[in-house]
Image (cartoon, rainbow, N blue to C red):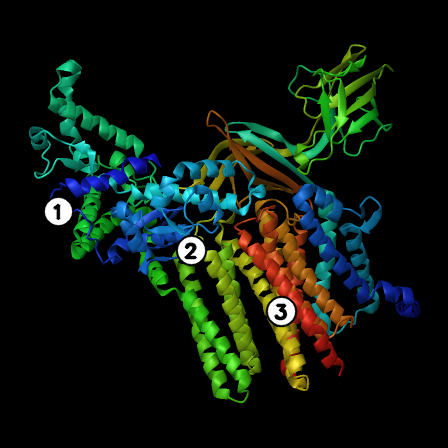
């Protein structure tokens, strides 16, 4: 944090007053550029993955503000401002604080849009740090929402302060002021200014060293003003290299061949300047900053491209596969396939609703089918792109389970529609697609969803088999639940249409059987995986138990039907309750925070889960007596 | 035979035992137990919840209400399923899928039974360069007795201490010792001071009393202790206090023959010797997320040595033993210690077979249903 206060804020005042650079005169106010496509293509290593700066910017902005754009502009534009013009960017209100208690406790006026600027938070940083440190000392299970949020905000502010100094090496700073004209000449610094950047001086470190050598034999009191400047510059170089370490924005592949780790520009200042490639790349980054300030679009893009090519060439041997996927990932980012698919599913549902008013309009059903196909196509394309980008099966984190279950639900709906041609499948598909993509969007709002995996999950074979099949099982059971709703509503509103009810009942049985088969297969494959990696087929882990509960629940329904303990209505009610069982297995057990599968879960979803369960119980309380009456009539 | 079978088939008790209602009741109760046993893990921990709900025949709720545990429920389901197969099931081609499914389920029961009674779970923690042929249990304890000896090989006799009760007597034949249990706690606290010393109570660590602690939800945090009256071959009796956290065994001597006694985590002798040659841990670059960890080991069996690698999702198997990469630790000097989980499971392949058979049954049933629908 101190870094930021000592450097980034100061340097902007300096820029306004005295500016000097080799070839690009910097204006007192950054003009900024308007074209960021090349900049967005720069590769960055973040969370173990090499990704385009465009993705990095999106996930950072999502992490800070819960949105992927700022002020109507893409995240990459915002990131460029934070990196190149931190003084101005620090007044942008990007820090999302959900709970008003936090700004109140920090003495900051509560903002209606719940977003605050770095400048606001920086002023109260000491209080924030004190509160967050206290909260971090509390057992995570005992923390309340405010305490959890305090920790998150504190981490975000710290990360932001580090981001804001990532390009400080290229901005003039008083630490590198050279008053003596003769020293400026010896250091071959450009004329026209007295204040220089870290990189300008660091590139002349050898000259400084040579000038400092005679001073070892000379008493300090006899040093000339120029010699004192030499020592000051040298010690500031050392101080900066110690102070600015381990910074984010790791865009420079390591200069040692075997090293997989990447460096931020500030880290590269310490280790990369020894290498020709390092010097060239740092100068390109400096030039990028200068052209940004000068507002020279074309030059900015060309420099960014030059940097990308240089870094890419060096990273190709280790990260060739990831780098080749960049165009695809950028398309994925631009396309937002899941957002559009969600909209199309909603549209499909509206068409279905219109179809209820016009039951004989076959053309309308065809339109609905067409829109559904389009939505499903985009949804499938999105999932396929993710598979291609990460070289991994479709499901490897909780976010992806929602995408995938939604997709299977849509596919199942399409199969049902092909078989029944009576809107049932269209309705099922639209509901499954819309609901699951909405939940996914909520999860996706936490940062980059294209994540790396922990060691035990790092197995494409088991991810492809166990995880995929169990999620297909979830999907099947959810589809059965949706069909169960439809059956009850049909029973209430169209009790005389026996043919329709019979068809829906058969579809329900098929969906339940499909769900049971895949839940069973997925659970067993999970057991085999567990036996392969932990040495036991079954360990009563909450996630395993959840899967077992789905199997038991569907088995109960089938056996109760065979034993004539329940009829078609009972089966419909059972399959609606089956969704609750699936929700429990899928993410409810994660609430318990025990066991081997307890990955990401937010408290907000716990409330949503409860609301869902209550809504279902209410639905059944209202509809069941009515349906029962119609059934007996 | 046939008439008796038909008579049985029609008899009310047999029809009841083989009824679908029993199956539904068992499935519902298993569903409840599974949910309950999952939620209970939050407060009681996995081990205790597993013992109470899943491994038990019955358990007492609120201290007085006996409820069936999963083991009893599964036995009832097993009998119901078997009775159904013999007396009620209609054997015809259309039902072949259902038949296969339930055959697979029956084999699950067999697998569960074998696993419940035939699995030894232990672990082996090694530094780089270290060798071992004995693995240590996670939370099973034994009372071990051996004689001090100059040689390398030790003859150790041991018995399980789980479930020992006051007043119980355990007699060993070699060495001929008798252990009378004066008191025993599955989880105990030891005292060295504060209580008046008990005369003639032997203990190497200076412990003079024990008190009972409630069982911890993490079973590895339970340390048993007890006071035993040991009768030596010469007929002399000695009171010995032993506690699970002691690092030294308590010596006993009579008639020129000495014995060492210790309560320790149960040891399992392995059929092979394992040497950790190197341990390697990789992280995703620039993060603390582990990408892989891997033990390079040398296995020796009857003088033949071979190298092997053990890492996540890639265990080493030897007969019915399997060695898994479980965890690792780094000490202050930066040296790695790798922990390998050792599982001996004689019925390891049974769940694989059951899964295959049951899934085949589900698939066949699906195909049969689809075929019938089409032919209609």
Disc 1 is placed on an element classified as loop
Q: Percent position (x, y) of residue A528?
A: 60, 52
Q: Quadrant of the N terminus of chain B?
A: bottom right
Q: Percent position (x, y) of residue B245?
A: 67, 24
Q: Percent position (x, y) of residue A561?
A: 74, 71
Q: Is residue B64 left or right of residue B203?
A: right
Disc 2 is placed on an element classified as loop
Residues flagged by tags 2 and 1 on a common chain: yes
Q: Quadrant of the C terminus of chain B?
A: bottom right
Of the pair A311 and B14, the residue shown nearer to us = A311
Residue at the disc numbered 1: A24
User: Does the image show residue A314?
Assistant: no
Dividing the picture into quadrants, the one containing residue B63 is: top right
Residue at the disc numbered 3: A481
Dividing the picture into quadrants, the one containing residue A22 is: top left
In space, the residues marked 2 and 1 are separated at their CA atoms by 42 Å
First in sequence: mark 2 vs mark 3: 2
On what subunit does the disc labeled 1 rest? A
Of the pair B333 and A55, the residue shown nearer to us = A55
Dividing the picture into quadrants, the one containing residue B135 is: top right
On what subunit does the disc labeled 2 rest? A
Residue at the disc numbered 2: A112
Instruction: Rate crowding at label 2 as few (under 14), some (14 to 19) or many (20 or more) other CA atoms within 10 Å.
Output: few
Residue in the image at 84% along x and 67% along y: B87
Q: Is residue B4 left or right of residue A305?
A: right
Q: From what the image shows, is residue A500 above or below residue A302?
A: below
Front disc: 1 or 3: 1
Q: From what the image shows, is residue A369 above or below residue A88?
A: below
First in sequence: mark 1 vs mark 3: 1
Q: Residue furthest bottom?
A: A360
Residue in the image at 55% along x and 73% along y: A428
């Amino acid at each position: 944090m101190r870094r930021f206060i000592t450097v980034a804020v100061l340097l902007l005042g300096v820029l306004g007053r005295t500016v000097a650079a080799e070839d690009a005169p910097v204006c007192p106010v950054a003009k900024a550029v308007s074209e960021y496509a090349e900049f967005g293509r720069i590769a960055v290593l973040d969370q173990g993955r090499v990704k385009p700066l465009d993705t990095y910017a999106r996930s950072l902005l999502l992490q800070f503000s819960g949105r992927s754009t700022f002020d109507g502009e893409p995240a990459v534009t915002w990131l460029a401002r934070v990196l190149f013009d931190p003084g101005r960017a620090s007044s942008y209100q990007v820090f999302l604080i959900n709970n008003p208690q936090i700004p109140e406790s920090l003495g900051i006026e509560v903002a209606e849009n719940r977003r605050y600027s770095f400048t606001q938070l920086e002023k109260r940083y000491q209080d924030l740090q004190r509160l967050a440190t206290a909260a971090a000392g509390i057992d995570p299970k005992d923390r309340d929402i405010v305490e959890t949020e305090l920790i998150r905000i504190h981490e975000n502010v710290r990360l932001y302060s580090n981001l804001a100094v990532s390009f400080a090496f290229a901005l003039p700073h008083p630490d590198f002021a050279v008053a003596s004209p003769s020293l400026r000449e010896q250091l071959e610094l450009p004329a026209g200014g007295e204040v220089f950047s870290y990189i300008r001086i660091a590139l002349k470190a050898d000259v400084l060293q040579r000038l400092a050598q005679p001073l070892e034999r000379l008493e300090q009191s006899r040093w000339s003003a120029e010699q004192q400047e030499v020592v000051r510059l040298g010690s500031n170089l050392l101080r900066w290299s110690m102070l600015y370490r381990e910074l984010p924005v790791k865009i420079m592949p390591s200069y040692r061949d075997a090293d997989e780790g990447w460096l931020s520009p500030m880290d590269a200042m310490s280790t990369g300047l020894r290498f020709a490639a390092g010097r060239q790349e740092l100068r390109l980054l400096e030039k990028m900053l200068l052209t940004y300030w000068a507002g020279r679009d074309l030059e900015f893009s060309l420099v960014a491209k030059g940097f990308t090519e240089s870094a890419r060439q060096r990273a190709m041997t280790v990260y060739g596969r990831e780098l080749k996927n960049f165009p695809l990932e950028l398309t994925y980012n631009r396309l937002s396939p899941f957002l559009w698919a969600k909209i199309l599913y909603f549209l499909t549902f509206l068409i279905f609703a219109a179809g209820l008013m016009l039951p004989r309009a076959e053309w309308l059903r065809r339109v609905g089918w067409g829109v559904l196909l389009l939505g499903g196509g985009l949804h499938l394309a999105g999932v396929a792109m993710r598979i291609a980008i990460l070289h991994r099966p479709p499901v490897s984190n909780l976010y992806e389970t929602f995408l995938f279950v939604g997709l299977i639900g849509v596919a199942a709906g399409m199969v049902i529609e092909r078989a029944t041609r009576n809107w049932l499948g269209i309705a099922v598909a639209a509901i499954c697609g819309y609901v699951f993509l909405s939940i996914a969007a909520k999860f996706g709002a936490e940062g980059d969803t294209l994540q790396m995996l922990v060691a035990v999950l790092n197995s494409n074979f088991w991810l492809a088999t166990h995880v995929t099949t169990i999620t297909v099982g979830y999907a099947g059971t959810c589809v059965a639940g949706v069909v169960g709703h439809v059956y009850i509503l049909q029973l209430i509103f169209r009790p005389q249409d026996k043919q329709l009810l019979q068809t829906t009942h058969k579809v329900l049985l098929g969906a339940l059987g499909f769900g049971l088969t895949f839940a069973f297969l997925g659970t067993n494959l999970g057991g085999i995986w567990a036996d392969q990696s932990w040495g036991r087929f079954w360990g009563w882990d909450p996630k395993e138990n959840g899967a077992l509960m789905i199997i038991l629940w569907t088995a109960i329904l089938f056996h109760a039907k065979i034993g004539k303990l329940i009829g078609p209505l009972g089966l419909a009610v059972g399959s609606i309750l089956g969704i609750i069982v699936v929700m429990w297995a899928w993410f409810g057990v994660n609430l318990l925070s025990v066991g081997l599968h307890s990955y990401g879960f937010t408290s907000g979803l716990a409330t949503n889960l409860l609301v869902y369960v209550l809504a279902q119980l209410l639905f059944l309380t209202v509809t069941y007596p009515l349906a029962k009456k119609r059934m007996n009539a | 035979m046939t008439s008796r079978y038909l008579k049985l088939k029609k008899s009310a008790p047999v029809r009841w035992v083989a009824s679908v209602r029993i199956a539904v009741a068992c499935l519902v109760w298993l569903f409840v137990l599974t949910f309950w046993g999952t939620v209970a893990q939050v407060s009681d921990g996995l081990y205790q919840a597993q013992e109470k709900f899943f491994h038990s025949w019955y358990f007492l709720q609120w201290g007085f209400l006996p409820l069936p545990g999963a083991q009893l429920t599964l036995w009832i389901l097993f009998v119901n399923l078997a009775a159904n197969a013999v007396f009620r099931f209609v054997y015809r081609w259309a039902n072949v899928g259902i038949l296969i499914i339930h055959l697979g389920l029956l084999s699950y029961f067999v697998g569960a039974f074998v696993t419940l009674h035939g699995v030894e779970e232990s672990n082996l923690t090694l530094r780089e360069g270290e060798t071992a042929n004995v693995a240590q249990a996670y939370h099973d304890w034994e009372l071990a007795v051996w004689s001090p000896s100059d040689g390398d090989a030790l003859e150790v006799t041991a018995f399980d201490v789980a479930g020992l009760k006051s007043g119980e007597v355990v007699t060993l034949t070699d060495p001929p010792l008798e252990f009378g249990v004066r008191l025993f706690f599955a989880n105990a606290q030891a005292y060295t001071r504060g209580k008046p010393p008990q005369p003639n109570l032997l203990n190497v660590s200076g412990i003079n009393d024990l008190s009972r602690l409630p069982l911890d939800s993490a079973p590895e945090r339970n340390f048993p202790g007890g006071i035993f009256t040991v009768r030596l071959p010469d007929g002399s009796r000695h009171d010995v206090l032993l506690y699970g956290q002691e690092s030294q065994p308590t010596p006993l001597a009579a008639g020129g023959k000495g014995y060492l006694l210790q309560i320790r985590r149960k040891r399992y002798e392995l059929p092979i010797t394992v040497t950790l040659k190197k341990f390697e841990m990789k992280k995703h670059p620039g993060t603390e997320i582990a990408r892989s960890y891997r033990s390079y080991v040398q296995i020796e069996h009857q003088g033949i040595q071979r190298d092997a690698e053990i890492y996540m999702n890639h265990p080493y198997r030897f007969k019915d033993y399997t060695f898994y990469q479980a965890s690792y630790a780094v000490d202050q000097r930066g040296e790695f210690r790798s922990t390998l989980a050792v599982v001996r499971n004689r019925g390891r392949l049974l769940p694989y077979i059951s899964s295959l058979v049951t899934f085949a049954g589900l698939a066949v049933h699906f195909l049969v249903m689809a075929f019938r629908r089409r032919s209609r």
